Amino acid sequence: MNMKHIISLTEFIRNYGKYSRLIEEIGYIILLKNNKPDKVILDYTFIEKNNIDLLEIRGVDNGKTNKVTK
Protein backbone atom coordinates (compact mmCIF):
# COMPACT_ATOMS: atom_id res chain seq x y z
CA MET A 1 0.00 0.00 0.00
CA ASN A 2 1.24 3.47 -0.71
CA MET A 3 0.03 6.91 0.28
CA LYS A 4 -2.13 7.40 -2.83
CA HIS A 5 -4.41 4.70 -1.39
CA ILE A 6 -5.10 6.83 1.72
CA ILE A 7 -7.32 9.89 1.36
CA SER A 8 -9.20 12.14 3.76
CA LEU A 9 -12.98 11.90 3.62
CA THR A 10 -13.17 15.64 2.90
CA GLU A 11 -10.76 15.32 -0.04
CA PHE A 12 -12.75 12.37 -1.40
CA ILE A 13 -16.01 14.32 -1.25
CA ARG A 14 -14.46 17.38 -2.95
CA ASN A 15 -12.90 15.32 -5.75
CA TYR A 16 -15.22 12.33 -6.11
CA GLY A 17 -14.65 11.91 -9.86
CA LYS A 18 -10.87 11.91 -9.50
CA TYR A 19 -10.94 9.30 -6.73
CA SER A 20 -13.58 7.21 -8.46
CA ARG A 21 -11.15 6.80 -11.35
CA LEU A 22 -8.32 6.05 -8.90
CA ILE A 23 -10.42 3.30 -7.29
CA GLU A 24 -10.97 1.76 -10.73
CA GLU A 25 -7.22 1.92 -11.38
CA ILE A 26 -5.84 0.57 -8.09
CA GLY A 27 -8.83 -1.35 -6.74
CA TYR A 28 -9.43 0.36 -3.42
CA ILE A 29 -8.85 3.39 -1.24
CA ILE A 30 -8.86 3.96 2.50
CA LEU A 31 -10.72 7.02 3.76
CA LEU A 32 -9.53 8.88 6.84
CA LYS A 33 -11.78 10.70 9.28
CA ASN A 34 -10.01 12.87 11.86
CA ASN A 35 -6.70 11.43 10.60
CA LYS A 36 -7.76 7.85 11.46
CA PRO A 37 -8.81 5.05 9.08
CA ASP A 38 -12.60 5.11 8.80
CA LYS A 39 -13.79 3.45 5.57
CA VAL A 40 -12.48 1.26 2.76
CA ILE A 41 -13.94 1.54 -0.72
CA LEU A 42 -13.39 -1.45 -2.99
CA ASP A 43 -13.89 -1.65 -6.74
CA TYR A 44 -16.10 -4.61 -7.62
CA THR A 45 -13.58 -5.87 -10.19
CA PHE A 46 -10.94 -5.87 -7.42
CA ILE A 47 -13.28 -7.98 -5.27
CA GLU A 48 -13.76 -10.51 -8.06
CA LYS A 49 -10.06 -10.71 -9.02
CA ASN A 50 -9.02 -11.25 -5.40
CA ASN A 51 -11.80 -13.74 -4.63
CA ILE A 52 -13.10 -11.69 -1.73
CA ASP A 53 -16.30 -13.22 -0.38
CA LEU A 54 -18.43 -10.35 0.88
CA LEU A 55 -20.58 -12.80 2.84
CA GLU A 56 -17.50 -13.55 4.97
CA ILE A 57 -17.23 -9.97 6.24
CA ARG A 58 -18.12 -10.16 9.91
CA GLY A 59 -19.23 -7.40 12.29
CA VAL A 60 -18.33 -7.06 15.96
CA ASP A 61 -20.73 -6.25 18.82
CA ASN A 62 -20.79 -2.55 18.01
CA GLY A 63 -21.81 -3.35 14.42
CA LYS A 64 -18.57 -2.23 12.78
CA THR A 65 -16.93 -4.41 10.16
CA ASN A 66 -13.67 -5.92 11.33
CA LYS A 67 -12.64 -8.68 8.93
CA VAL A 68 -12.42 -9.40 5.22
CA THR A 69 -11.39 -12.88 4.16
CA LYS A 70 -10.48 -14.35 0.81
Image: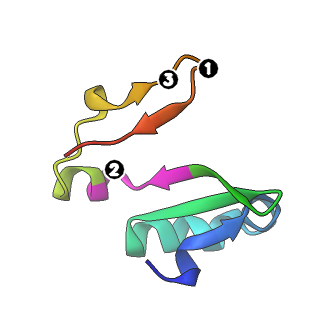
Work out whether 60 lies above or below 39. above
Tell me which numbered mark, 3 or 2, is placed earlier along the sequence.
2
Question: Label 2 to label 1, Cα distance in Å?
Answer: 26 Å
Question: How is the rendered protein coloured?
Answer: rainbow
The three-letter amino acid code for the residue at tag 3 is: Val
Report the span colored magenta. 40-46
Residue type, mark 2 in image: Tyr
Front residue of 23/39: it is 39
Q: Amino acid at mark 1?
A: Asn
Which quarter of the image is occupied by the N terminus? bottom left
Mark 2, secondary structure of its residue: helix
Crowding at dot 1, Cα within 10 Å, few <14 / some 14-19 / many 20+, comes out as few
Measured as percent of width and height from the top left, residue 3 is found at: 57, 82
Mark carried by residue 46 = none
Q: Is residue 20 above or below residue 70?
A: below
- Relative to the observer, which residue lies in front, 16 or 28? 28
* Residue drawn at 52 percent across, 64 percent down: 29
- Residue 12 in percent (x, y) is at 72, 63
Image location (x, y in percent) of residue 50: 19, 57
* Callout 1 secondary element: loop
* Cα–Cα gap, marks 1 and 3: 6 Å
Q: Which residue is mark 1?
A: 62
In the rendered image, residue 4 lying in the magenta stretch gets the answer: no
The reply to whether callout 2 and callout 1 are in contact (CB within 8 Å) is no
The residue nearer to you, when weighing 37 against 50, is: 37
Give the residue number, with chain letter if any, for mark 3.
Answer: 60
Identify the disc placed on residue 44.
2
Determine whether the residue tagged by mark 3 lies in a helix, strand or loop.
loop
- Which residue is painted at 57% across and 61% down in the image? 30
Q: Are marks 1 and 3 in contact (CB under 8 Å)?
A: yes
